[in-house]
Image: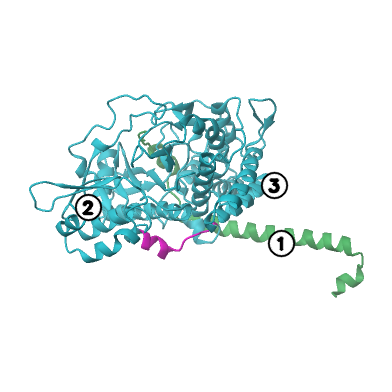
Chain colours: A green, B cyan
Amino acid sequence: MSDRERSRPQGRDNEQEEAVEEVEAAESSATEGIDDLLDEIDSVLEENAEEFVRNYVQKGGE
Amino acid sequence: MAVHKVIGTETEYGVLIRNQPDFNPALASALIINSYPGDRVRVQWSYEEETPGRDARGFGHDGYGVSDPDSALVNAVLGNGARLYVDHAHPEYSSPECFDPLEAALADKVGERVMEMAMTRAQQTVPAGQIVKLYKNNSDGKGNSYGAHENYLLARETSFGRIIRYATTFMVTRQIFTGAGKVGSENGRPGVPYQITQRADFFEEEVGLETTLKRPIINTRDEPHGDPGRYRRLHVIIGDANLSEYQLFLKLGVTALFLAALEDGALPDPIDLADPVESCWTVSHDTRLRAPLSLDEAGTATAVDIQMRYLEWLAKYVERELDDPVWDRVIAEWAATLTDLESDPMLCADRLDWVAKKRLLEAYVDRDGLDWSDAKIRALDLQYHDIDSRVGLYHKLAGRGAIRRLFTDEDIEQGVKTPPSRTRAYFRGRCVTQFPDSLTAANWDSLVFDTGDTHLKRVPMMEPLKGGEDLVGPLLDQVEDAAALIQALGG
């Protein structure tokens, strides 16, 4: 049993608090993940977005 | 009794050669096809056997499917049984006939790799400064759409009226897990920042023969590519090209299962939408998946509600009728995905292209304070579909494990070289590899050989499930040349 649990013995509140902490931890690692990802993608992004989008013209197919 | 659901896909790729002053998409497509470095034979595609103008409702018109004397220039059959060719202004990969949805999902990914190999080789032939690009998407964002079609084998006796009655609502609502996502709207539809599919905006009819204008939810092309007395082929045009392996499996698996149950009479009364075409747009534009769709009877249901009902029906059908564990997997993944879509669609960012891309674009909108109509967001949308694995954003996500994979790179390389083993694609692919100089013409249901004799020899393949390794493998291992093969086949 952890110190924290001993000092706050109401199990239910405790579980909720831990659940919140877990969610926050997961969110922060997801955000870190996405920041890394964006950095990686920045390095391969089309340099001139406007020109790229304007010149992407296809004929209809099928 | 349902016929075995043989499955295949046809995907047209967006093509571009940057900095080429006189860029012509048809020529660029031909360059791609002719650059493919793997096993392939350039063949005459025998159009006389094809009847894309025949309508499953019993009428048709002439003028479609004209034979093109130059077709050998832009038509190749590959050692894996696929067809690689130019369709109008796009390079297209038609997968070999596959035995189950897992194999068909792999075959579709193999097509991407084939295109990447062809693109890489084509790049070496253009002047310095020009860049060859291919995109696996279905729209240029300016009102032009190109297709990603699915094909499912059905029994001839399955009435087309029943297919229309049941499959229309299914096709409209499955968009929640078939979409590849798109920034904005097109074709005069109401503006949205982002929508679920690339294609919904282009669908304007419930049923019809067209594929290039006034596109119908149910396409009636009656061209079985097999014994017309026994088979139909349902040509599904309301789908997006997918990069996610998981999503390909889900799309092909659930649809094949739905059609099998329909054929077996295992579905309760159909769920009819009051306005299928309007619902098609509504579903695609509703990224929160909460929009009520008006039903014919009265009342409303969301796309998720309706798919949940299909899931319930089909889970029972699988339990009762099907032994192959691949169908249990389809049910399990479908259930998991629908549950996640219902609670929070963003949970599917690891599986569905439209969600993965939305999450990525939202992160850019947030970080850079961009508007959804910003050119950078539109550029990111396109780049998600870039098939160059060094710069394509799908590849960046999959490479980091942010999108689940079902196959390894080795599976895909293997699929480039070898045909599926349980359909006639096996025979076609082996003949390409073994007798490239004797094969002169091909179609899905025949091969034509020049064995040096006075007549060309045509080998019909009217049964999609005949011609697999079991049946023809030992024979192909024995024969030395095409003449010996024809002789052994009794011709």
Is residue B318 left or right of B39 when viewed as pictured? right
**Which picture quadrant has residue B79?**
bottom left
Residues at discs 2 and 3 both on one chain: yes
Q: Secondary structure at mark 3?
A: helix
Q: Position of residue B290 (x, y in %)?
A: 67, 37
Residue B232 visible in image: yes
Quick check: is B368 in the magenta stretch? no
Comparing B130 with B368, the one in front is B130
Q: Residues within 10 Å of mark 3 (few under 14, many from 20)?
A: few
What residue lies at 60% left-to-right and 60% top-to-bottom? A33
Which one is closest to the eye, mark 1 or mark 2? 2
Tags 1 and 2 touching, CB below 8 Å: no
Q: Horizontal placement of B193 versus B383: left or right?
A: right
Q: Alpha carbon of mark 2 to alpha carbon of mark 3: how far?
A: 50 Å
User: What type is the residue that disc 1 sits on?
Assistant: Ala
Answer with mark 2 or mark 3, whichever residue precedes in sequence.
Answer: 2
Residue at screen point 53% across, 41% down:
B264
The front one of B134 and B213 is B213
Q: Residues within 10 Å of mark 2 (few under 14, many from 20)?
A: many
Label 3 close to label 1 by CB (< 8 Å): no
**B225 sits to left or right of B236:** left
Evaluate whether residue B128 shows in this view.
no
Q: Which residues are magenta?
A: B403-415
On what subunit does the disc labeled 1 rest?
A
**Type of amino acid under label 2:** Val
- Name the residue beneath numbered marker 2: B41
Q: Element under label 1? A: helix
Q: Residues within 10 Å of mark 1 (few under 14, many from 20)?
A: few
Q: Report the residue marked by disc 1.
A: A25
Q: Which mark is residue B343?
A: 3
